[in-house]
Amino acid sequence: MRTNYRTLLYSAALCMMAGFSSCSDETDLGGSLQEIQTISSITLDQTVYNADVQNLYMLPNQEIQLGCTVLPEEANDKSVKWTSQNETVATVSADGYLVSKNLGTTVVRVTPGIGFGPSATTPSFTVNVVDHFNYIEGITLKNTDVLATEGLAESASYQVEVEALPATATFKRYKWESLNTEIATVDEKSGLVTGVKAGTATIKVTADDFSASPVSTTFTVKINPVIQIENFEFTNEAKEYLGQLGYGEVYDLKKSVALTPSNATVELISWSSDNASVASVDEDGVLTVHSMLSGSATITASTGELTKTVSVNVAEGRIWYSFENGIGDWSLESGNNSSVVKSDGEKTTIKMGGSEKYRGDFVWIRKGVSQTRITPSVYRYLAMKIDVASPLSAGSNAAGCIKLELWDDSGDKGTIGNNYTGAIKSANNSFEVLDGGSFQTTAPNVIYWDLQSNYDKHTPTDWNQTFTLNCLKFVIADYTATDSYDIYWVRSFKTIDELKAFVESDETNK
């Protein structure tokens, strides 16, 4: 039975009013008590001073009214109370009027009117009172070239990605404006561009950071007229590619079809998958592989009376993960106190934990929590694109190390073993840099491991087998010169030539 603390309080009050009688099961209170609807959750409203969900930045002697959303709507008492942990930094009235005072930090919390409740009803945030704001000095647009060249169809939408310079800017917020709303519109907060009719529009984005002279930039979007599709086919190249997808892969199916006429509007095609657990596809034709093991699905593409299908297959042992928008099914070792700082559409930045020696282990499979298979006889080379500012010394972790831990589930850390050692190096830093160069500290590196090389426990005499993994982990540890790193992708390849071709292509981060 769910305990309702307001009901208990009301019942106690009735007992006290009775005075001469005890509160027992036999007491007749003249009818049944009506259950009181209590607050189940409180959600904080965003303010102009929010740098993110958990942090407000204010100068001394600034004021703002705080707000929140209380659920359920039917709650009998929706009153809340605000408190500040350190009133020398900032004060807040019971009804949420916040005043910043002195430099420092304080935690502001909102609770139900009675002053307590479950965690969902007591959210908090940090107020940082600073002596100045760091303003945005430049705005970088990451994916707008395609809007000017290929364009966008009428009624289609496109999410523009933006990055603030410097990275230390306090408020990384923007205001978006279309200068030609009859051609294209843009969401004023998110930067989502939507086509209206054929033509060319200019979109303006301006820093929203309290600067007296906020920086801005513009870009052009071409809106193409809708041209009906007379026919379409999946290309032979696409069919071949879709026959060997890797777990974690994301693929835009729109580029897999040849249209008649060639300038027809591909957005007119609708997509579906008959096995979304293996590979799903969204309304924009973006396919995502979900199966860790081999599997298949049939993708259906339809427009008007035209319907075509194509088979997609997950290849045994192929890994194909990009980290432009987060770490997906991967995780960080909890004991290292590492965290994801940001994802900018190209890479994910991870803050390592520690003080003098930083650590941020990057984990896919850990002690059987999930399982997948590798096929070293086919997908022999496991590669990673990573950017770390600290130098590495091969065979040593004195200045930082990246170590592959990989073993299967056959006991005693498996047939493969624990640590990959390579032919001549120790377990630490026993990777190869693509093209035989040295590890770079001023640019991203592509490094790889030969999965048929030596391991510290066992090395099978026959790699022509499929291994079910119990662990796949990159130990990233003992860094002294930096507290963060950028990871772009982790992927497996059949040959070094295949890896080189991929890196040299325009699809490196896709």
Image: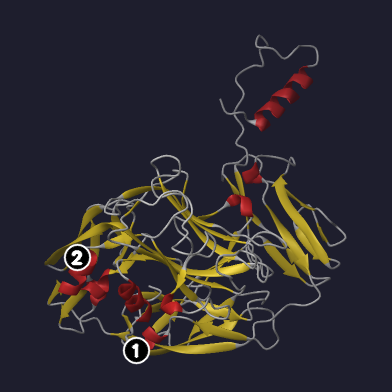
Image height of 346 relative to 118, above or below: below
Per the rendering, the mark at residue 108 is none
Q: Within 10 Å of the Cα at label 2, are there few (<14), some (14-19), or many (20+) other Cα atoms?
A: many
Residue 183 in sight in this render: no
Of the pair 195 and 22, the residue shown nearer to us: 195
Query: Most extreme residue toward the front, as rendered?
Result: 424
Q: Position of residue 247 (x, y in %)?
A: 34, 58
* Mark pair 1, 2: CA separation: 25 Å
Per the rendering, the mark at residue 301 is 2
Q: Quadrant of residue 165?
A: bottom right
Q: Position of residue 133 (x, y in %)?
A: 74, 77
Image height of 188 relative to 283, above or below: below
SS at mark 2?
Answer: strand
Of the pair 346 and 84, the residue shown nearer to us: 346
Q: Amino acid type of disc 2? A: Ala
Q: Position of residue 212 (x, y in %)?
A: 71, 86
Mark 1 lies on residue: 149
- Report the residue at 77% width, 60% height from top: 97
Quadrant holding the N terminus: top right
Q: Position of residue 422 (x, y in %)?
A: 45, 62
SS at mark 1?
Answer: helix
Q: Amino acid type of disc 1? A: Thr
Dot 1 or dot 2: first in sequence order is 1
Of the pair 371 and 356, the residue shown nearer to us: 356
Q: Quadrant of residue 223?
A: bottom left
Image height of 231 relative to 466, above or below: below
Residue 192 in sight in this render: yes
